[in-house]
Image (cartoon, helix red, strand yellow):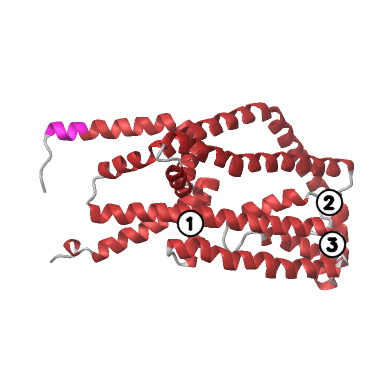
Amino acid sequence: MKQLSLPQKSFLLLLGLLTLGFFWILLPFSGAVFWGVILAVVFAPVHYRLLNMTGNRPTSSALISLLLILLMVILPLTLITLSLIDQAAGIYEMINSGQINFGTIFQRVIAALPTWVHSVLERFELTNLESLQAKLTAGASQISQAVAKYAINFGSMTLDFLVSVTVMLYLLFFLFRDGQSLSARIKRAVPLGTRYKEPLFDNFIIVIRATVKGNVLVAIAQGALGGLAFWFLGVPGPMLWGVVMAFLSLLPAVGAAIVWGPVAVYFLITGAVWEGIGLAVYGVVVIGLVDNVLRPLLVGKDTRLPDYVVLLSTIGGMALFGLTGFVIGPVIAALFIVAWELFASTEEFHAE
């Protein structure tokens, strides 16, 4: 191995420090930069088609691609968010006015339970309505304080959100316009041989597209189906619960059942048997079918990752990185598998 000279070592040290400094500067907009890169990768095939249609005019095709993202992603998300805020405020008012009374709901549930379940709950003091109401009152007070805090900070949060979206769209335009040359420069700069770089870069792109495309489509489908069922059954805030189910559906094999399951149980034990059975069957057969059929086809097939790896990497990624983890987790898992396959298939690492 060639020994590096002192000037080369000094330059590498400087390069490392400048790289850390650059990422530190970008840290306040890390979310905007991350989603800008993700959207650029996902919509790259559309952009390349537009590039051909516009006669190889990068600026024009980048502007059209940006407009499509505004119409297909940003505008629908904004409208859903506004409707979500409206329904959340409506449910909050219903709780304050007593139209939704958790004490009454709890009492109805306890009264419908079998005697042996009731006796077990009494041992753990879980049937004491007064104690429960005190806890619910304390919880409602904490929720009210949190709502007031977010209401006060809503203006600054909105401003931060608009700044982040602006930065993301601004970056996205240049990623579309200069993406090919930029990716080529990054590939050249990575200090790996071609036999290593090509599989890693290719899998990086494949996994991002498959994960975002698959998880987002599954989330939209499950959230829409769950919200539609809640609307039909008269559950308050169906859009709110639909959005919650959509977010939870990002967790493979867990997902929307966390929401519709307890609602189905509530219907069953409070006497609305047909509603409970209908929701349970609908949840297992229809909502569950979306997860069991679409997710492996859209995510596992393209990434060539086993289902259990997709599940563990998604949950682990979201636990560490929040919402962005549903992309970061599978990407790291795919690159991990590819890197070890390259290591195992390269003879120079195993020469005796």
Along the horizontal axis of the image, is 189 left or right of 85?
Answer: left
- Picture quadrant of residue 273: bottom right
Q: Quadrant of residue 290?
A: bottom right
Answer with mark 3 or mark 1, whichever residue precedes in sequence. 3
| Residue 194 in view, yes or no | yes
Residue that appears at 76% across and 44% down:
139
Q: Amino acid at mark 2?
A: Phe
Which corner quadrant of the image does residue 274 belong to?
bottom right
- Which class describes the residues within 10 Å of circle 2: few (<14), some (14-19), or many (20+)? some
Instruction: Please state which of the two labelled residues, at mark 3 or mark 1, is closer to the viewer.
Output: 1
**Residue 12 percent location from the top left of the image:** 22, 35
Distance (Cα) linking label 1 and label 2: 42 Å
Instruction: Assign a secondary structure to mark 1.
Output: helix
Boundaries of the magenta span: 6-11
* Amino acid type of the residue that numbered disc 1 sits on in the rendered structure: Ala
Disc nearer the start of the sequence (3/2): 2
Identify the residue position indicated by label 2 in the image: 102
Residue 229 lies left or right of residue 309; in this view the side is right
Q: Residue at x 85, y 72 (%)?
A: 115
Residue 248 rendering spot, x and y as whole percentages: 63, 55
Residue where numbered disc 3 is placed: 109
> Which residue position holds label 1?
210
195 vs 100, nearest the viewer:
195
